[in-house]
Image: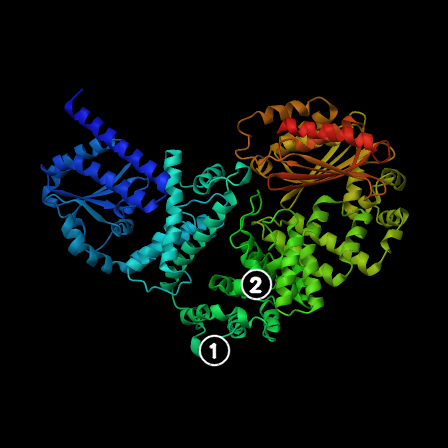
Amino acid sequence: MTEGARSTAELKSSYDQTRRGIGQRFLDQKNPEAALTELAQAVDDLVIQVAEPFLEQSDFSLIALGGYGRREMYPYSDIDLLILFQEAQRKGVERSVTRMLHQLWDLGLDLGHQVWSIDQLEGSLEPIEFGLALLDARLLVNGRGPGQSLLDSRLPGLLAQNRAELEEKIISFSEERHRNFRDTIYQLEPDLKQAPGGLRDYLTGKWLLQLGATRPFLTQSQAEIEEAASFMRRARIWMHFSSGRNQNRLRHPLQESLALALYGAKSGNRPDVETLMKDYFLNARILNGFCAKLMETRRPVPSVSAIAVSEIPSQDSAVAVLWIFLKSIQESRLLSDATRSAIVRTLPGFYESLRCPPLKNLIRSLFHPRPGLYRALTEMYELGVLESLFPEFGVVKARVIRDDYHQFTVDEHSLLAIKHVELLLSEETGIDQRFSGLLKETPEPELLTLALLLHDVGKGDGEGHATRSADLAVTALERLAFGSEEIDTIISLIRNHLAMSSVMFRRDLDDPSVIESFADLVREPSLLRLLTLLTYADIKAVAPGTLNRWKRDLLWQLYVETYRKLTFGFGEARVQEEDVEDLLLAALPDDLETEGFERFLEGFPLSYLKTTPATEVYQHYRLARSRSRDNPVQLALTLDRKYYRLCVVAPDRSYLFAKIAGVLSYFDMNIFRGYGFANRQGTALDLFRFSDTKKAFSLNPTEEERFLQLLRQVISGEVSVKNLLRGKETSLVHRRRFVSLQEPRLYFDNDISDRYTIAEILASDSIGLLYRIGHQIAGVECSIELVLINTEGSRAVDVFYLTHKGLKLGAELQEQLRKRIIDSVRTAL
C-alpha cells in the first residue's frame, strides 16, 4: 500500500470519526446550528488538508458555495466548490485541480464543483444560476489565487449590476417550486427543503433581502422566523443522520421516529406524531409567509391602492378593526403594512370590547359570503384578529388529524370550506350551478359560514367532535350576543354536519324509509338547505378532488328527495308500481313487446323503476331478451364522462355478485356503487358504476374486450376469480407501499328497513375486498338485494342490504356471517 493511499485512509478515518462525534452531540443536544457549523468546519479541515499540497504547485482559490458556503452543511448534502484561477495559469491549474478532485472523491465526498477563470466574470453572471450560487460564496483557501479579489471587489459590483435578473430568477424558481407542490404547505409527507414553507422558502426571503429588497411588515418577529428555520434544520439533520443519506422527505414512518426523537412517547408508548406535524405546519406557515411577503415587495404595485391608516377613523376597538376588514371586502382592497401594524397594536385591548352591541351585526356582515371573504378571514387569522374574536378557533391552530384523506390541518380545512362557499358565487367554469343556486336562495348565508368556521373546533378531544364543537360554538356565540334562533340554527348545523355524508355514502337513497328518517332529523327545508351547502363545502375542503361528480350527484339526490319529503309529506309513498309501469309502457319502443317487458319487470324493486332512466330500462330488457341457451350472459359496458357503467344480465345464481366484483378488482377498478336483484323469472340484473383509476381501458383499446371476455368466463365458471385475485395479491407490482390497517368492523341493523337486514362493513381497502365479502354472504345462502360501496382514503365502507330466503336475517345467522366476513377480511390483510 502506498504512502498516498495510507494518507487518504487516515484522512477518511479521521473525518468519519469527527462526523460521528458531531452526530452524537446533535442527538444529545438537538442544536441544529451548532451541528451545521461543525459539519461545515469538518469539511473545511478535510478539503484544506487535501488542497494545500496542490496550492504550493499552482495558483488557484477554493470558494465554498451553496449551503456549504453558508456554513449549513447537512450530513449527506453535496459539497459545492468553486475553483477560481487566473487565465494565464490555466494549464498548470487544470493538472493540479484534476488530481486534487480525484483525491477528494477517493475520500467519498459528494462533490459538486465549478472551475472558472476570473477573466470569465466580466459584467454578467451567466448562467444566472451561477450568480445565485455566488450569493452564498465563502473563501475557503486562497493560496495566490484571485478568490479574495472576487469576494472583496468584483462580486459586490456583479451582484448590483445583475440584481434585477437575479431577483426575477429567484422568484420564478420559487413559484415553479411551489407549483410542484400544488402551492400549499399542507403536504402529508412534506419535503423539508423544497416544499412551500420549507428551508428553501427561508433562503428565498434571505436572498431577496441580501439583494436589497425592502423588509415588509411581518406578523412574526425575526426571532420567530429564525426559530421556525431552526425547527426545519433540526428535523432535516435528524433525517440525514437517521437514514444515512440525503433524505429530505418526511415520510410517514419517519414522522413516527422523528416525533419519538424530539418529544419522546405519549401514553401507551406511542410517538406524538400529531404534535410533530402541528409544529411543522406552524413553522412552515411562518417561513412561507416570510418568503411570500418578500416576493410581494418585488412584484408590480396593484392597480387598486391599499387601505391606509389615514382612511380609518380609529383602530382602538374590535368594532373599528372589523370595520377595516369589512371595508377591505366591500372595496376589494388590501391593507397597507402600516394598517396591518396598527391592527396588531390594537389586539391587547381587543377582548375587552368584544361585547360591544354593534359587534354582532358587524360579524354577520363580515361573514356574508362574497368574493374576498376567504382572503379577509385568512388575513384576520394571520394578524391574530380571528383568534381574538373566536378563541375557540385558536384551539385547533395547525391541528393535524392523521388519516388517509384529510390533506389540511383543521383550521385551514375550515377556512377552505368557507372559500368553497364563496366560490359558488363566482363566475368560474366548473362551478356546480345546482349548489350555487341553492346558496343564492338562502336568506341568511352568514350563518352557514359561521358554522363552517366552528364546525371542527372540538377535534382532537377524542370521539364525538361534532358535539364538542357545538358546545364550544354555543359559548362563542353567546359571548358575541347572538340571538337564540341564530344560535339554534348554527348549532344544529354543527351538531349534524356529518349526517348527510353518513346517509349518502352508507344508506340506500332509493329507500323511502331512509329519506323519511333523514327528513325527521332535519325537519325544516331552510335547515336542509344550509346543511346541504355545509356538507358540499366540508367534503370539498377535505382534499382536491374529494367531492367528485358522483358524490355531488348523491348529495343533490339526498337534498331533493328530502326536500320533497319535507314539503309534500308522504305523497310519493302512495305511488304504485303499476303507475310507473304505465309510464314506461306509454313510451315503449316499437321493437319491444309489452307482454315480455312486463314479465321482465315483475319482481324488480320499485326503486329501480323510479331511479333508472326509461332508455336504460329498455336497454336492460333488450339485453335480457338477447339471452339464449348458448349465450346466457349478456354484458354492456358504457363510459359516462369519467365513469363506467357495467350492466350484467344473467341467470340468478349464488356468488354472481361476488364474481363480478372480483373481476372488477382484478382490473383495479374503483367501484362506486353496485346493485343486484332478480325478477320472478330468475333473471338477475347487476349494475355497477366504477372508475378506471389506472386508465387500463383508455391506454389499451383491447383491454375492454379482454375484461368482458374474462367476466363471461368467470360467471360461467370457466375461470376461477379466486385464483385470479390470489395471483394479484401476491404480486409485488400491486402491493401497496403504505397501508393504514384497521380492525374490520361489521354492524347489522334490522330496524331501518321493513324488508332487509342492513350490514355495514368498515375495513382497510384491499384488492378483492368486495369479492371476499360477497363470497362469504353467498356462502350462507343470503341474497344481496343492494350494495353501496364507498372508499374514504384507504378505508372501505360497504353497506349490504341482505335477505335469507326472502326474510330478514335472524340473530344466529347474523353472528355466523359476522365471523365469516371478519375472518376473511383479516386473513387478506
Q: Badges 2 and 1: C-beta atoms under 8 Å apart? A: no
Front-most of 332 and 92? 332
Residue 90 picture location, percent across and down: 12, 41
The image quadrant where one finds the C terminus is top right
Front-most of 624 and 668? 668
**Residue 645 visible (yes or no):** no
For the residue carrying disc 1, how many other residues have a C-alpha within 10 Å: few (<14), some (14-19), or many (20+)?
some
Q: Residue at x 82, y 43 (%)?
A: 751
Above or below 184: residue 313: below
Q: Which mark is residue 478?
A: none
Single out the residue that lies furthest toward the bottom. 313
Alpha carbon separation for disc pair 2 and 1: 24 Å
Front-most of 668 and 582? 668
Judge from the rendering whether residue 107 lies leftward or rightward of residue 394; answer left or right.
left
Question: What residue is disc 1 on?
Answer: 312
Above or below 1: residue 438: below
Q: Residue at x 53, y 65 (%)?
A: 388
- Element assignment for label 1: loop
Q: Residue at x 72, y 44 (%)?
A: 506
Single out the residue that lies furthest toward the front. 267
Mark nearer the N terminus (2 vs 1) = 1
- Element assignment for label 2: loop
Q: Nearer the viewer, mark 2 or mark 1?
A: 2
Q: Amino acid at mark 2?
A: Phe
Question: What residue is disc 2 on?
Answer: 390
The image quadrant where one finds the N terminus is top left
Above or below 542: residue 781: above
